[in-house]
Amino acid sequence: MNFTAMTDQAVAAEIGQRIEQMRLERNLTQQQLAEAVGLSRVSYAKLVAGQGKFTNVIAVLRALDQLALVEGFVPETVPSPLQQLKLKGKQRQRASGSRGAGGEVSGEKPEGLDW
């Protein structure tokens, strides 16, 4: 499936439909799953329609024993070795943004680097 060509709402609805399919495979009613995560059936129905809160999506995935899917959804990133040396144990708090004109990323190499 090409998520890039889809609207945000369409992606959310597709995720909801996939969650709904997992529920059906476990032979649970919407009411049973909603109660397991502390939602009303109406709130669960909105979730599978792509209108749910992200925390509720996580709760439903947990109830379906599918929380590991979050790792593939947003994998953990590790700074490059060069970036780790620059940080020297400091945790990055924000992005510096681009330095080029008009918000475009500059193609120039940083000073001091010869590669």
Image (tube, rainbow, N blue to C red):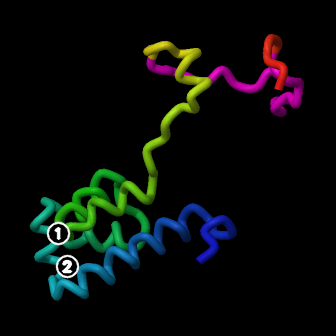
> Is residue 65 positioned above or below 109 on the image?
below
> Is residue 20 positioned above or below 100 on the image?
below
Q: Residue at x 49, y 41 (%)?
A: 77
Q: Residue at x 16, y 73 (%)?
A: 33
Provide the residue span drawn in magenta.
Answer: 91-110
Q: Residue at x 30, y 60 (%)?
A: 68
Q: Which residue is mark 1?
A: 34
Is residue 72 in view from this perspective?
yes
Q: Residue 38: which quarter of the image?
A: bottom left
Q: Dot 2: what SS? A: helix
> What's the magenta bit mostly, secondary-structure-wise?
loop
The one of 48 and 91 positioned closer to us in this rendering: 91
Which quarter of the figure is the N terminus placed in?
bottom right
Instruction: Farthest residue to the front: give it.
Output: 114
Q: Which residue is mark 2?
A: 30
**What distance separates the C-alpha of mark 2 from that of mark 1?**
6 Å
Q: Amino acid at mark 2?
A: Gln
The magenta stretch spans residue 100: yes
